[in-house]
Amino acid sequence: MSSRENILGRIRASLHRVDGDGATARVHAHIGAHGMSARPSVVGDLTAGFREKALALSTSIDEVVNIQSVPAAVAAYLSANALPMNAVCWQALGVLDWASHGVTMAARPARESDKVGVTEVFCAIAETGTLMTLSGAHTPPVTSLLPETHIAVLRVSQIVPSMEEAWQRLRETPDYPPRAVNFISGPSRTADIEQTLTFGAHGPYRVHVILVNS
Amino acid sequence: MQLTSHQFKARSREKLADANLQGALKKLQGNFVKGRADRVAELENFPAIRDAAAAIRARTLDHLDLYLEEFERNATARGAVVHWAETTADVNRIVCELAAKYDVKKVVKSKSMVSEECALNDALEAAGVQVVETDLGEYILQLAKEAPSHIVAPVVHKSKDQVSDLFAEKHNLPRKTGIPELCKEAREQLRPHFASADMGISGANFIIAETGSTLIVTNEGNGRMCTTLPRVHVAITGIEKVVPTLEDIATLMRLLPRHGTGQTITNYISVTTGAKRQDDTDGPEHFHIILLDGGRTKLLGGEMQDMLRCIRCGACMNHCPVYQSVGGHAYGWVYPGPMGSILTPTYVGLENALDLPNASTLCNQCGVVCPVKIPLPDLMRKLREKQFAQGLKPRTETWGLALWRWTAQRPRIYAMLTQIAARVLAVMGSSDKLIHNLPFGGGWTQGRDLPAPQGKTFRELYKSARLSETQKLG
Ligand code: SF4
């Protein structure tokens, strides 16, 4: 007998599983129902809620009126923090006018040497101030991971109350489920040495959100 | 990891005298205990969320075979390969076979307690594969050739100065003294490994039946690196980690970071499903998932089943007065604290960890804070009963108890003996009314004092109080 059969056999014996008792159907029905458990209520304005929680996670936030204003905001952020004006971005952002704001932008996946990565997000969670990104041909996860600075473009309409709503939205996507779903809550950190919080463990030192209002 | 649980008492004595460790453990209480309390207070309906989390885990265990089959079906449909391992040796064998199959020279690892159960690094190194731990704490331990002392903060027992010395020696670089500089140095040392590794190994905090996904929570981002950059990803986890749906993950994620590190949420939650898709520019080409039994099925269906609800948050150890005093190494295996006092004897044999179920005051702090409502003290008590029933208790203890039972059933003799004892002990007490060294009870008075009795037994006092009471009434 294979290990698989042995393990499942031991489980069935311990649980006194009887074939044909309808348990399989109940399990499928339970999964299919996607039932929600008790959760905290997320009240008030979602954007304000997201902003407060994200700031508490050491994410910084800027706000712009429309997507065309993003390059100017990125340029301003980079120069204010004395960061390089070279960056890489996800494909959809490549069409924006970066050059006239002094940013040299390459629309390709980030590599080891890239210092700034600009991405969009799939959605954001107000309850915790979290960004949710999906992997895909044009949305490579490396761009939010390898560079020391991650800038995320978030549209106000993408903010949902809680993780439950984020999962519901995910189920409606054509490529569901993607290879990787990454929830990002602020810059990478560690407290392994003497329990002292330090940023930039392996991932970005900075996470900056540009909130697009329209 | 090598088992040394039988040395619990000796190692505890060592640890109590370790000033460095004692300072770190104090700080842990401040950070993790207070952090948990603050974060839990943010949830207005915390008791209901905790009930729900416990119910999710309990429900899954009651249907474990079916949820595992569902998980396997969905994971396989998305291009992952699921392996079943009955023992930790099987895990090592499977990983080494995969390493050979894919011609793997170097492995980067993100923190996995299950791989510690297996002593996987030793097996891989014996097979000629280089293994690099990438969680900062685990990396430090790998350099120092030490074992983790906490499941969430593995290197909590080490001081910054010790890390400075270690890095200076192993990296051959000028000695750094600031914590940010030390972290940066580790980052720079590890970065090239992520890019050059052939295989990434991770654990899984949960696996999701609905989608066939594995999920890891990290703060550093090394978990994302290990599961994104190498061409092979192997996730190793216990069979009990399955949950039915993504909604269940939302509930559990409200509790795990709060109870683990006192965070509302961890920096990264990464859910991976299947291998790299055709058009993807990153992600592993091969994704293997290993499900370990390793003693878990022994807990199913019996009075210990509740233990399998554990989500490995570490709150029980952070709140345990015994862990707070001796730290994790004294427990002698992968899992310390109350959860370890139950898991170690059940996974590696009660006879190999006799002290652990007794390393508790049964104060129930652990049971109160456990996010999935595991009645840890009850389970420890059950293990003690089992020890007794199997004759695993030391002779002196069994005889002592037998003697006590015999006298307790004979009130006159009992009264006489206790009268003598109360008087003798009263005389033995020093000026501060404490007995510092009890003959035949040295083990007890070695670490604490026994308050000396007043000289009369309770029954004597009760009798005379009753007498004066009736005289007054009369
Ligand atoms: S037993 Fe409970 S408190 Fe302890 S690690 Fe497991 S889930 Fe956390």
Image (tube, rainbow, N blue to C red):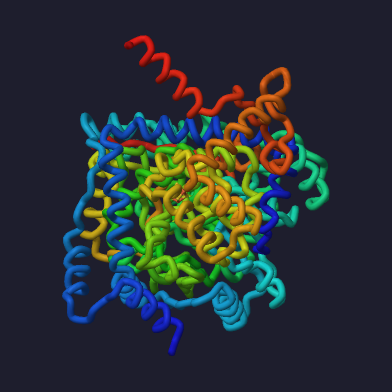
Going 23% across and 60% down the picture, which residue do you hit? A171
Going 57% across and 42% down the picture, which residue do you hit? A190
Taking B111 as reference, is A208 left or right? left
Q: Quadrant of residue A173?
A: bottom left
Where does the N terminus of chain B fall, quadrant-wise? Answer: bottom right
Q: Position of residue A129 (x, y in %)?
A: 36, 38
Q: Position of residue B269 (x, y in %)?
A: 42, 51
Q: Position of residue B176 (x, y in %)?
A: 77, 38
Taking B56 as reference, is B199 left or right? right
Taking B167 as reference, is B253 left or right? left
Q: Is residue B287 visible?
A: no
**Vertical side of B110 occupied by B454: above or below:** above
Q: Is residue A44 visible?
A: yes
Q: Position of residue B345 (x, y in %)?
A: 55, 61
Going 34% across and 77% down the picture, which residue do you hit? A13
Going 65% across and 54% down the picture, which residue do you hit? B396
Residue B118 or A55: which is nearer the viewer? B118
Residue B310 or A88: which is nearer the viewer? B310
Q: Quadrant of residue B2?
A: bottom right
**Vertical side of A95 occupied by A212: above or below:** above
Q: Quadrant of residue B93?
A: bottom right
Residue A101 or B275: which is nearer the viewer? B275
Extreme residue toward the bottom, this view? A1
How many marks are shown on the rendered structure? 0
**Vertical side of A174 occupied by B27: above or below:** above
Where does the C terminus of chain B fall, quadrant-wise? Answer: top left
**Vertical side of B323 occupied by B202: above or below:** below
